[in-house]
Amino acid sequence: MTCTRCFRKIAPSILEKNCKGAQNTPWITHDPKHCALTTHSMSGASQEGTRVVQPIFFGKIISYVENYDPNDSAALHEAYGYAAGLSACLLVWAVLHHLWFYHMQRMGMRLRVAVCHMIYRKALCLSSSAMGKTTTGQIVNLLSNDVNRFDQVMMFLHYLWVGPLQAIAVTALLWMEIGISCLAGMAVLIIILLLQSCIGKLFSSLRSKTAALTDDRIRTMSEVITGIRTIKMNAWEKSFIDLITRLRRKEISKILRSSYLRGMNLASFFAVSKIMIFVTFISNELLDNLITGSQVFTVVMLFEALRCSSTLYFPMAVEKVSEAIISIQRIKNFLSLDEMSQCYPQLPLDGEMIVEVQDLTGFWEKASETPTLQGLSFTVRPGELLAVVGPVGAGKSSLLSALLGELPLSQGKVRIHGRIAYVSQKPWVFSGTVRSNILFGKKYEKEHYEEVIKDCALEEDLQLLKEGDLTEIGDGGTPLSEGQKARVSLARAVYQDADIYLLDDPLSAVDAGVSRHLFQQCIRQALKKKITILVTHQLQYLKDTSQILILKDGKTVEWGTYSKFLNSGVDIVSLFEKGNKQSEPSPVLGTPTLISESLGPSLQSPRPSLKDAAPEDQDTENIQVTVSLEDHLEGKVDFKTYKNYFTAHADWTVITFLILVNIAAQVSYVLQDWWLAFWANVQSGLYFGEFVKGDEDVVFVLNWYLGVYSGTVWKPQDSKLKEAPHRISSYYGSQ
């Protein structure tokens, strides 16, 4: 819970400020490390401490076996004690090790979820200028790649200090066991650790470059998917495939370099402990020190204790921390982007809800000379319906954006008291049921829900669906027409029971009959006690509104009631016709709006539509697209699938060779320890005079064992090395 508490303190300071400058930079790099280091540091140190103690008990047991005396009962009881201590250490280590990784994985997961929460909240608060500095692809990359580094780094973070401390403890024990010769092996470890630290810097550089290339690729893919219709119609597929392939190759080249470095780290895990043992025993041999079986196993186990913490977990910690630092920096840069103004909306303290705009002027781009909106002023109170009309490009949607706080204001004042519900001009649904799209996280209230369904003209559509409002829609589900999406979006807003409704032309996506129903039953009746601001091109409904705001080029042409316009002789239709000469003609007063939807699903989805077979006099708005959902394969995975997977980039000859190499590597790895023990027994016999036929024989026999252990053959002893197996077998045969 420590990590969660830390982020509860961090999130408000990051998300409620506009981070402008280094002094306000989000400080997520400090507290996660602090809460992690102070929570489980003792547990990590304890579990590695038990690994250091195990070789001591094991060496004592072997020493007892070497010096076995059936009459020495005290030594026997000591051996039992050592065995009990060894068993206890193994048990304690197993428990602590699994608890350690469990808690660290859990902490990493909480950290990842907390950062994802911060990113999502920040994405909802970004200003328009900040949106120009980031892309959807970058945000997706942060949520899919960068946050995953927290899961990984927490498991190995402590080994940055546990590994060196354990190495110091092992060095002290080795000094007590074999003396100064242990320093040779530890020197190898120090060299490897320094090399891995340098590799960590390379990981940071490669991770930074890889993330930038991934952002480019995802951004390009997003743009291609968005414009796939244009690409297909112009036969540009090959050009864009080549473009994405080039970006992917650049990304893979960086990933491959990281993989090579990661392979070097893993190779050190398997090889370094054996190299340290080899160098240590060479030094011990050069110093003419006696080595016994108990010493061999004690030294080997002490080096093996370092194998995981210093040669595996430490380099992985360096790698993961290096990558996490880059990810944290990328997340910090994103969290430092400017946010929308939070001065409004405010909840009404005295129960009075209002939308008041005074001399509003705003720019989408600060460098622009012409303001998007200029000098707008109006007031809307509960129970009033304000219709915002004007030609294309007049600034109607920008006005709603200004009320939402998304359009930066350079002048004027906006006062909003109440909770806002917004229906965008482009309707949208997410993957889920129709009901979940309407509820949008709110509690299901059957009576209110059914009223909303009726007001938004969704009853007939839900009856046509096989599962009713529990039908899956969105990606992979039943596709909806644009009109159906518009009504689902409107129902979502109405169900929220907000105080203020901002409706951006929801009537243009539906047929004339449905449009009349939505305006009369939903906007005028269901929202009659609310503050409603409706952007529309449906001029036939203006007479039923409380106020009308006519915009042109971001400026107010007229503002007042319908009767006021009639008395003053303002020709609203002429404003539309003049403003829309270069665009599609808008409907005029008294003319029903007929926007055909039959092409919508057919252009957006290759799935079949039943609208093509509908009678001409039937209302196409209520015809549901019938599709078969995606097929899902069930059952066992065929052997051919595994075969194709393993032979994707190699034939069976290469695969067989790799399998044999891995088997040989494992066999040689095990034989090293066996040969070392065998060598120790022979050397012990040499020192006790059991196999002495002259100094020259002693030297060549030791060199022969050393050569076999190191995998080398020394030329000066070629002739005698050929005789070595025979001499050794003769010696053991004579015993």
Image (spheres, grey):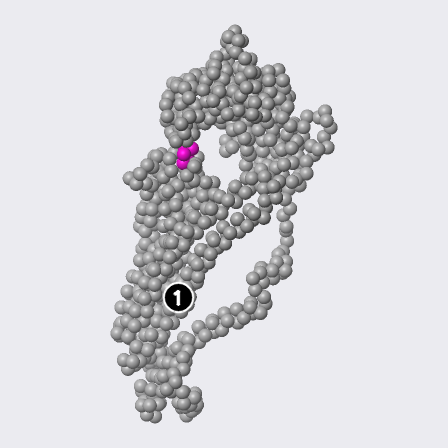
Q: Position of residue 717 (x, y in %)?
A: 38, 87
Which amino acid, mark 1? Ser
Q: Position of residue 546 (x, y in %)?
A: 50, 14
Between residues 531 and 438, which one lies in front from this camera angle? Answer: 531
User: How many numbered callouts?
Assistant: 1
Q: Residue at x 48, y 55 (%)?
A: 252
Q: Residue at x 60, y 35 (%)?
A: 470
| Quadrant of residue 96 within the rendered picture | bottom left
Q: Is residue 561 above or below residue 97?
A: above
> What is the secondary structure assignment of the residue under circle 1?
helix
| Quadrant of residue 315 within the rendered picture | bottom left
Q: Quadrant of the N terminus?
A: top left
Q: Is residue 101 above or below residue 436?
A: below
The answer to whether residue 39 is visible is no
Q: Quadrant of the C terminus?
A: bottom left
Between residues 228 and 511, which one lies in front from this camera angle? Answer: 228
Main SS category, magenta section: helix
Between residues 620 and 186, which one lies in front from this camera angle? Answer: 620
| Quadrant of residue 648 within the rendered picture | bottom right
Which residue matches tag 1?
Answer: 268
Outermost residue, top side: 567
Reply yes or no: does residue 717 show up in magenta. Answer: no
The answer to whether residue 297 is visible is yes
Q: Residue at x 56, y 62 (%)?
A: 649
Residue span colored magenta: 126-130
Q: Is residue 298 above or below residue 236?
A: below
Q: Position of residue 527 (x, y in %)?
A: 52, 20
Q: Position of residue 325 (x, y in %)?
A: 36, 50
Reply yes or no: does residue 127 show up in magenta. Answer: yes
